[in-house]
């Protein structure tokens, strides 16, 4: 069965990655939706104006929004009313309340009635809810890595939350999007390494919502490194020696059947080359029982498992297709 899938924001990094993946998908035909002029010309693919009239007339099976939160806030209501499935890659509907969105995104939420309709699209934890859903909010890249590393251990009560958790996160420049800015210009990024949005990063509440942590229990710092793509997070916490001994078994039990999660043997660590241009998330860790310390290293490609790949994973589930289609 062939499904027609509209891609809005296809000229951005995330949208372009979606098109690359869909080009190899056995069941999905991509259609370019132009939401601004001019957009990059890709004449070999069909294209439509991104309007309610065009979407309704074409009867698209799904629309992937690789757009800014502002565009998604405007488009999601009429897309859902048209009957099409939606996967939104922006942060517009990831948080549960308008107040939370306004605090972290520094803007009013103009479609609060749709927040409760959005299923948070982290398949490893929400697969049942995603399957058959009409509206999925794709997770952010930093929270994807952090929650895949932390949630199984927190659920098993293996982390001493009173000691706090430190997440030191580093990302390639593509995570900032394609829109030009001084911060991501060549002279600012090359041969440089900088922290940003310290204590105020908009991805923090996603980590809290999925992991169950309170804000005071997590210290998260995002840093920009001079590479094109990739996220590496180094996570530090404390636990009893007995709990430290259970980390590997907990990970392997949680992720034994997951197609995109790979657990490294204790004391070995993944790097960015291992996951570049793939939908994999690789997790390595080391423990020090004498002091109760543990360190996790988790890596993903921010444009794939952190954006387009996870969106396609969600779309496959929504359409009743094999979850790995177009991704393996």
Image (cartoon, rainbow, N blue to C red):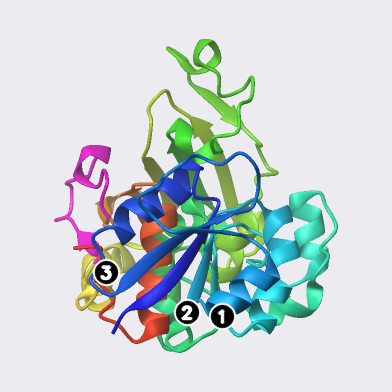
Judged by its main secondary structure, the magenta piece is loop
Quickly name the residue at label 2. Answer: 61
**Residue at image mark 3:** 251
Query: Whole-Å distance between the Cαs marked 1 and 3?
Result: 36 Å
Stretch in magenta: 260-278
Q: Are marks 2 and 1 in contact (CB under 8 Å)?
A: yes
Q: Which of 310 and 5 lies nearest the eye of the viewer?
A: 5
Q: Secondary structure at mark 1?
A: loop
Q: Is residue 305 above or below residue 132?
A: above
Q: Residue furthest left?
A: 265
Q: Mark 1 vs mark 3: which is more N-terminal?
A: 1
Quadrant position of the N terminus in the picture: bottom left
Which of the two marks, 1 or 3, is nearer to us in this view? 1
- Asked whether disc 1 touches disc 3, contact meaning CB atoms under 8 Å apart, the reply is no
Q: Earlier in the sequence, mark 2 or mark 1?
A: 2
When asked about the image quadrant of residue 197, the answer is top right
Where on the picture, by quarter, is residue 55?
A: bottom right
* x and y percentages locating residue 210 in the rendered image: 54, 70
Q: Height in image: 224 above or below 282? A: above
């Amino acid at each position: 069965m062939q499904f027609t899938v509209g891609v809005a924001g296809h000229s951005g990094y995330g949208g372009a990655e979606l098109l690359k993946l869909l080009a190899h998908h056995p069941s999905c035909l991509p259609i370019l939706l132009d939401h601004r002029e001019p957009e990059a010309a890709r004449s070999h693919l069909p294209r439509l104006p991104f309007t309610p009239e065009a979407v309704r007339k074409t009867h698209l099976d799904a629309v992937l929004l690789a757009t800014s939160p502002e565009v998604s806030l405007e488009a999601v209501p009429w897309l859902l009313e048209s009957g099409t499935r939606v996967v939104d890659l922006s942060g517009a509907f990831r948080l549960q309340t308008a107040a939370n969105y306004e605090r972290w995104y520094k803007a009013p939420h103009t479609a609060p009635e749709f927040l409760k309709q959005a299923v948070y699209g982290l398949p490893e934890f929400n697969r049942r809810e995603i399957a058959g859903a009409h509206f999925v909010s794709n997770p952010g890249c930093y929270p994807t890595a952090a929650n895949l590393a932390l949630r199984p251990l927190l659920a098993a009560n293996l982390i001493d939350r009173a000691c706090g958790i430190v997440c030191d996160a580093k990302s390639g420049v593509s995570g900032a999007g394609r829109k030009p800015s001084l911060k991501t210009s060549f002279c600012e990024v090359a041969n440089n390494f900088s922290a940003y949005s310290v204590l105020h990063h908009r991805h923090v509440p996603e980590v809290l919502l999925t992991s169950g942590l309170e804000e005071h229990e997590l210290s998260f710092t995002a840093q920009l490194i001079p590479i094109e793509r990739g996220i590496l997070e180094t996570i530090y916490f404390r636990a009893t020696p007995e709990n430290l001994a259970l980390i590997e078994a907990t990970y392997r039990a949680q992720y034994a059947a997951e197609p995109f999660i790979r657990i490294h043997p204790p004391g070995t660590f993944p790097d960015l080359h291992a996951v570049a241009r793939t939908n994999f998330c690789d997790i390595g860790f080391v423990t020090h029982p004498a002091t109760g310390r543990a360190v996790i290293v988790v890596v993903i490609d921010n444009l794939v498992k952190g954006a387009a790949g996870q969106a396609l994973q969600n779309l496959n589930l929504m359409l009743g297709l094999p979850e790995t289609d177009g991704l393996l």
